[in-house]
Image (cartoon, rainbow, N blue to C red):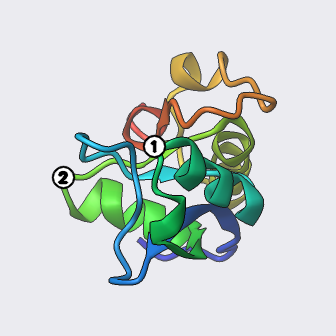
């Protein structure tokens, strides 16, 4: 899927092996609205020592995970709101039921990209 407007949606906490840091014991790939949010998430997971950098997640990357793969990315409220706005600017349909409950101040990565993008 080609996009005209490909903004940063959020930031992943990335380790030295360039893998996404998520809660231990899960396969969750969380993303946050700021680089500091990603850093704080790694700290809250007890993995602050593994944090190497905050990696930008672009709209095109989210679309690739959802439409060309079987994965999902969990977003905090700020990044979920960015995803919805970027999709609207690109004419990409979103699930209105999933998007109406997004709280932009939510700091936990709890919004599913797959649910948002599955109308």
> Does 105 sit above or below residue 56?
above
Report the residue marked by disc 1.
113
Q: Residues within 10 Å of mark 2 (few under 14, many from 20)?
A: few
Q: Quadrant of residue 108?
A: top right
Is label 2 in a helix, a strand or a loop? loop
Is there CB contact under 8 Å for labels 2 and 1? Answer: no
Residue 60 located left or right of residue 10: left
Report the residue marked by disc 2.
70
- Residue beneath the point at 70% across and 71% down: 7
Near-viewer residue (93 or 56): 56
Residue 37 located left or right of residue 114: right
> Does 18 sit above or below residue 10?
below
x and y percentages locating residue 106 in the rendered image: 72, 28
x and y percentages locating residue 69 in the rendered image: 21, 61
| The C terminus lies in quadrant | top left
| The N terminus lies in quadrant | bottom left
- Residue beneath the point at 46% across and 56% down: 47
In the drawing, what numbered circle is on residue 5? none
> Does 50 sit above or below residue 27?
below
């Amino acid at each position: 899927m080609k996009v005209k407007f490909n903004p940063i949606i959020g930031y992943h906490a990335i380790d030295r092996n360039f893998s996404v840091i998520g809660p231990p014991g899960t396969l969750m790939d969380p993303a946050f609205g700021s680089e500091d949010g990603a850093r704080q998430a790694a700290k809250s997971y007890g993995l602050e020592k593994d944090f190497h950098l905050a990696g930008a997640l672009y709209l095109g990357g989210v679309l690739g995970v959802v439409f060309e793969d079987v994965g999902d990315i969990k977003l905090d409220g700020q990044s979920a709101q960015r995803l919805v706005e970027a999709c609207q600017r690109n004419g990409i349909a979103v699930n209105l039921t999933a998007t109406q409950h997004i709280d932009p101040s939510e700091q936990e990565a709890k919004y599913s990209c797959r649910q948002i993008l599955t109308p």
